[in-house]
Structure formats: C-alpha cells, structure tokens
Amino acid sequence: MSEALLEVEDLKKYFPLKGGLFGGESGAVHAVDGVSLKVYQGETLGIVGESGCGKSTLGRSMLRLVEPTSGRVQFNGKNVLKLNKSEMRDLRREMQIVFQDPYASLNPRYTIQQTLMEPMEIHNLYERSSRKQRVESILTRVGLDPSYASRFPHEFSGGQRQRIGIARALILNPKLLVLDEPVAALDVSVQSQVINLLEDLQGDFNLTYIFVAHDLSVVKHISDRVLVMYLGRMAELASSDDLFASPLHPYTRALLSAVPIPNPRVKRERIILSGDLPSPVDPPSGCVFHTRCPVAQDLCKKQVPEWRELRQNHFVACHFAGEL
C-alpha cells in the first residue's frame, strides 16, 4: 500500500448545547467521537452511515472547516490542528472540498469566471494574464464549454453546477478532495456522469478522495476502502470488495441488506433494525449500537468494543463479530 497522505488519531467533535436561565452549556452533541484512520495517497476512502452518523462532520473536521474538539490530524507530514491562520490558508491549496448542494455552494452574484478566478487570486497563483486560460482549461476538463465562463450559476442545471464546484476545487491543484455527498442532489442519470468524471480526474490529477455518501451502490463502485460509521464512531473498515462480500459488523449487515439488487430472481433477507437512532447528545453506554443490535448481549451494554483487525486489513468494533 502507498504512503499515508492523511492520518487521523482519536478525532472528536462535540457541538455544545446552550440552555437554562443564563444560557450555560447544558450538554453536547457527540458528532464525531474518537475516529482514528489513515488515508493513503491515490486511494478513495468511502465513508457511509445513516443520516446523523457524523460522516460529513468528520470530513469537514479533517479540513478544519469545523474546528475539532480534540485529536490529531496529520496531512502530508503537517499537524493540521497546530497551524495558525496563515499556515492553514497555505495548506488549503492542497486540501479542497466539493459540497453536496450545487445550488448553495456557488455565489449567485459571481460569474463562473469570477468563481474560478477567486481562489487563484487569494493564493496568488499563476500570472494574471494566464488565469483566464487556466479557467478555460479546467472548464474543458470537467466537460463544460469554456464560453460558459461568462454566465451566472442560475443559468446551469444541477449537474453542470456540480461540475463547476469540482472545477473550483481543482483549480488550485490539490492533493486531497473531500467529496461531501457530491451526487446526492442529482438525477440518477447525471450521477453516473459525475462519478465517471471523478474517476477520470483522479487518475489525471493524482488525487486522493474521501467520498462521503449514503448511497452504498455508489460507494461500492468508486471506493477502494469503506469506513462504516454509527453515531459518531467507527463500526467497520475494510476494502470495498471485502466489506460488501462479507461484512462483520451487525450494523453493516443491516445497511447492506437494504441495498436493492437489480435481479428479481435474487432474494436477500432484509434485516430490520428495531428502535430509533439514539440521541448523539446522550449516546448509549458500552457499544453505541447495542440498543438496536439483533445480537446484543449484556457485555455490549457495559463495555466499549475494541477496534480490532479480524481479517487482513479488515477492522471492526464489535465484541462478537468473529462469532456471528
């Protein structure tokens, strides 16, 4: 396996809750709770889980778009959480994000040329005379006509806007892209076009992706490895092929049982989880999944499961994963 580009160690992000007569802190939302992982150069790491599991917050915390509560983030040999504002701004050239909503992520008052010029101006990249040429080149690369540069965002479809968002992320030649559900707001036919574009760009620009999504079919197609999260914590991490072929965690099995199979002759047992998703303000003791787990035992209520490697490069946080 290639060298680790990004290393995350015991990363936590708690959002404080205000309440009471004097507006004091009354609790905290445990959005990300102790995540440790490595992302390797040139790979695509998929992050999946139910809405509210913390996957988007994890991606943004790695980039310090939201400030982590504690932990360590090491990117290309630099401790991201120790950098000052000036150093962090310089590092942002190498770490970019593509947002979920292509309608909200573009400034409606800027033309596309202004949108793509702005990052180069902030970072003082390229000669002023060559910036327009750079804009035309990147638009062509994401499948848009360079003449579109003079238009405004409202003149484009959702798929075209997302291509512009990708172009804006690429304009600085980054090494890492966090893709925060980049196709969730698009039609299915457009989704496939954007996914294929992302795969082509990864090879051409030598990019590393963190792909946040809830659509497991898309994640299986694009990811080299997949991290499954539940209530802010890591449940399982393995190669895409291994995870989808033989999941170890009961939560992962329940998620995969809900993925439609495009063959009416193939039957799959649907695993229905009981109960509601617990509140991240007051997560359950022990294993956070035990309140909905079909195989939970007394130990699961009392003791946090160890993060262990049950098969080669296949990690899971479950007391009884090897016995299921």
Image: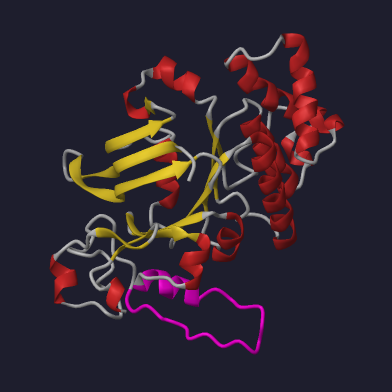
Figure quadrant of the C terminus = bottom left
Q: How is the image coloured?
A: secondary structure
Specify whether residue 262 is painted magenta: yes
Quarter of the image where one finds residue 322 = bottom left
Q: Nearer the viewer, residue 146 or 38?
A: 38
The x, y position of residue 167, in whole percent, is: 69, 34
Specify whether residue 288 is painted magenta: no
The x, y position of residue 212, in whole percent, is: 51, 51
Q: Could you tell whether 207 is left or right of 256 in the image? A: right
On screen, residue 257 above or below 180: below
Q: Nearer the viewer, residue 44 or 108?
A: 44
Q: Which residue is drawn at 35% across and 35% down?
A: 73
Most frequent secondary structure within the magenta stretch: loop
Q: Can residue 190 be seen in this view?
A: yes
Q: Could you tell whether 69 is left or right of 83 in the image? A: left
Q: Which residue is drawn at 46% across and 66% down?
A: 243
Q: Residue at x 22, y 63 (%)?
A: 305
Q: Which residue is drawn at 48% across and 66% down?
A: 242
Q: Which of 109 and 61 is in front in this view?
A: 61
Q: Is residue 107 visible?
A: no
On screen, residue 186 above or below 57: below
Q: What stretch is highlighted in magenta?
A: 250-275
Q: Which of 93 and 108 is in front in this view?
A: 93
State how many labels appear.
Answer: 0
Q: Could you tell whether 58 is left or right of 212 in the image? A: left
Q: Could you tell whether 93 is left or right of 253 in the image? A: right
The x, y position of residue 275, in whole percent, is: 32, 76
The x, y position of residue 78, in whole percent, is: 38, 25
